[in-house]
């Protein structure tokens, strides 16, 4: 008796892939429509030696019923597991009814928290998948080939991060103006009010001066292996957050500056940090502040497109998230977190990880 798995394929390929990994069949039959053929083909590519595709009408109940009966008859000598996590409601109904009457068949479902619900014997199990980020992104048609790891930076880069944070806090407006106009290839920028930033080529360091009417002028030197890169597009802040996650006990892998590309190789979208929590993916957007509501909409859409509905999203800022932006985050199922409202740069991690354990980890007991 061979172990065969039938999987109904909809718009979310991850539960289908996870069902195959969990039960480890010797043969897989992927039921898809013309509309979900691409999803089925991506799954098939991951199991090319055992998987096959069967295209079925998604709504014609007469055809669905007849084809399901025929398929069940052809597998009467096999042990069959039917994954109804995806596909249309008509498929779910007829596959559950037809195979549910067969003694050699089991019907199961995988929810977004990776719990396996076996409807045949009325049991449930928490699946501890060894999640592979590259596989997950391939399944959704967006392979990730360009990103950075924390190990791409040097120890002195990590040491300078909090110094940059405290320089910014001295004068938010002038620091922001300098950063918006600074690039990795510019040597000097002067705001004309006494605040300026310059690159000392001989000493390989950034020299920054900030004025503040209520305090003495600040003059600081920033020096590290990748200091010019760190000050470009707030990379220093993304590295700070990525490094924090790297020290969290639930994290398996952290990637930053993740660039998804079009087929012509041009950049399509960038995710600041992607965190592998073992059996769930956390997408992280890092900004000094939320300036427009569209920032939230853009992030929400990116999470769904690149990670699927089972991923979690975190929007982390330095400055407070207020009013409409806070409400929009909650409406979009995005976890909002502000560093300044949670102890500042020296102590925010305790509050952040406590929040995430309640919002994310407790869904993966």
Image (cartoon, grey):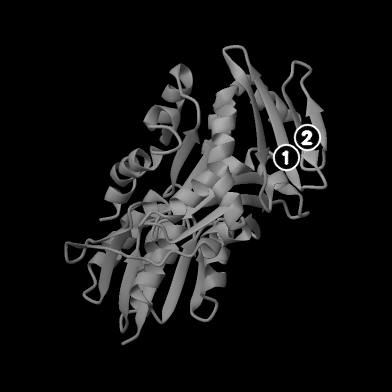
Number of numbered discs visible in the structure rendering: 2
Label 1 Cα neighbours within 10 Å, binned few <14 / some 14-19 / many ≥20: many
Q: Secondary structure at mark 2?
A: strand
Q: Nearer the viewer, residue 73 or 114?
A: 114
Residue designated by label 1: 206
* Rendered residue at 53%/65% (across/down): 135
Point out the image quarter for the C terminus.
Answer: bottom left
Residue that protrudes farthest toward the bottom in the picture:
1
Q: Determine whether, in the image, residue 169 is placed left or right of residue 89.
A: right
Mark 1 vs 2: CB contact within 8 A: yes
> Where is 33 relative to 162, above or below?
below
> Where is 66 relative to 142, above or below?
below
Q: Determine whether, in the image, residue 352 is placed left or right of residue 207.
A: left
Rendered location of residue 75, percent (x, y)? 35, 79
Residue that protrudes farthest toward the top in the picture:
213
Q: Determine whether, in the image, residue 333 is placed left or right of residue 47.
A: left
Dot 1 or dot 2, earlier in sequence: 2
| Dot label at residue 198 | 2
* Rendered residue at 52%/51% (across/down): 274
Q: Does residue 198 appear anywhere in the picture?
A: yes
Point out the image quarter for the N terminus.
Answer: bottom left
Looking at the rendering, which quadrant does residue 352 occupy? top left
Rendered location of residue 215, percent (x, y)? 57, 16
Rendered location of residue 54, percent (x, y)? 50, 68
Looking at the rendering, which quadrant does residue 286 occupy? top right
Looking at the rendering, which quadrant does residue 206 occupy? top right
Rendered location of residue 62, percent (x, y)? 40, 56
Q: Nearer the viewer, residue 203 or 231?
A: 203
Q: CA distance from mark 1 to mark 2?
A: 6 Å
């Amino acid at each position: 008796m061979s172990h065969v798995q039938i999987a109904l394929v909809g718009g979310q390929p991850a539960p289908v892939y996870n069902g195959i990994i969990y039960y480890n069949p010797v043969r897989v039959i992927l039921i898809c429509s013309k509309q979900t053929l691409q999803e089925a083909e991506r799954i098939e590519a991951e199991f090319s030696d055992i998987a096959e595709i069967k295209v079925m009408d998604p709504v014609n109940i007469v055809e669905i019923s007849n084809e399901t009966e025929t398929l069940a008859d052809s597998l009467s000598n096999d042990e069959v597991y039917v994954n109804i996590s995806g596909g249309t409601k008509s498929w779910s109904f007829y596959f559950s009814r037809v195979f549910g009457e067969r003694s050699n068949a089991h019907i199961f479902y995988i929810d977004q928290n990776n719990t396996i619900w076996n409807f045949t014997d009325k049991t449930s199990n928490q699946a501890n998948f060894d999640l592979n980020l590259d596989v997950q992104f391939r399944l959704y048609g967006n392979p990730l080939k360009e990103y950075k790891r924390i190990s791409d930076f040097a120890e002195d880069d990590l040491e300078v991060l909090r110094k940059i944070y405290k320089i910014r806090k001295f004068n938010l407006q002038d620091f922001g103006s300098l950063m918006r106009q600074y690039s990795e290839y510019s040597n000097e920028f002067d705001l004309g009010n006494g605040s300026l930033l310059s690159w000392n080529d001989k000493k390989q360091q950034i020299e920054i001066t900030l004025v503040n009417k209520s305090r003495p002028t600040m003059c600081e030197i920033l020096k590290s292996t990748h200091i010019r890169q760190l000050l470009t597009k707030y990379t220093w802040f993304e590295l700070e957050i990525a490094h924090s996650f790297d020290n969290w006990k639930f994290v398996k892998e952290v990637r930053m500056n993740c660039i998804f590309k079009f087929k012509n190789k041009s950049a399509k979208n960038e995710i600041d940090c992607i965190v592998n929590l073992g059996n769930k993916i956390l997408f992280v957007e890092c900004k000094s502040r939320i300036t427009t509501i569209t920032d939230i909409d853009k992030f929400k859409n990116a999470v769904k497109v690149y990670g699927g509905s089972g991923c979690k999203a975190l929007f982390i800022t330095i400055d407070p998230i207020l009013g409409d932006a806070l409400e929009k985050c909650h409406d979009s199922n995005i976890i909002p977190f502000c560093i300044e409202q949670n102890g500042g740069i020296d102590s925010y991690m305790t509050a952040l990880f406590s929040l995430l354990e309640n919002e994310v980890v407790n869904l993966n007991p």
